[in-house]
Image (cartoon, rainbow, N blue to C red):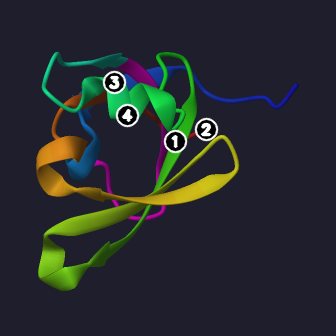
Amino acid sequence: MENRSKPSREMVLSALPHGEKGRIVRIVPSHFAVRLLEVGCLPGAEVERYAELGGGDRIAIEVNRVIIALRREEADTIIVEAYGAA
């Protein structure tokens, strides 16, 4: 198992800086929460923030070794704990 520092700060996924990793804490109830769970955005899963797409309206993330694009509105319903510096 990989050594990680303890998660240090909670935020919405869209606020996670590019290239930084975190752990999904919870999904805020919304009309697309089920879709997020179906694509692997589950509490406890590690997520990494990649690039912004479409002028910043979408962001790319990696979760469970899969890269997916989310609308910022969707990313704002995913609460993560960012990993602090080691």
Q: Residue 55: image x %, image y %? A: 14, 84
Q: Quadrant of the N terminus?
A: top right
Q: Nearer the viewer, mark 1 or mark 3?
A: 3
**Residue drawn at the location 47% of the way across and 23% of the way down:** 7
Which residue is more in the foreground, 56 or 36?
36
What's the residue at 27%, 25% (across, down)? Answer: 33
Q: In the figure, 49 relative to 1: above or below? A: below
Residue bearing mark 2? 86
| C-alpha span from label 3 to label 2 | 33 Å
Residue at numbered disc 1:
47
Kind of element beneath mark 1: strand
Q: Mark 3 and mark 2 in contact? Answer it, CB < 8 Å.
A: no
Whether the residues at callouts 4 and 3 have beta carbons within 8 Å, the answer is: yes
Is residue 49 covered in magenta? no
Q: How far apart are marks 1 and 2 (CA)?
A: 17 Å
Q: Please tell me which of labels 1 and 2 falls first in the chain.
A: 1
Label 3 crowd (10 A; few <14 / some 14-19 / many >=20) = few
- Residue, x 36% and y 34% (percent of image)? 35
Tell which circle, 4 or 1, labels the residue nearer the N-terminal end.
4
Residue at image position (58%, 34%) is 46
As shown in the figure, which amino acid type bears the numbered disc 2? Ala
Residue 24 image label: none
Membership of 22 in magenta stretch: yes
Callout 2: helix, strand or loop?
loop
- Mark 3 — residue? 34
Query: Is residue 85 found left or right of 57 in the rendered image?
Result: right
In the image, which is nearer the foreground, mark 1 or mark 2?
A: 1
Foreground tag (4 vs 1): 4
Q: Residues within 10 Å of mark 1 (few under 14, many from 20)?
A: many
Q: Position of residue 37 (x, y in %)?
A: 43, 26
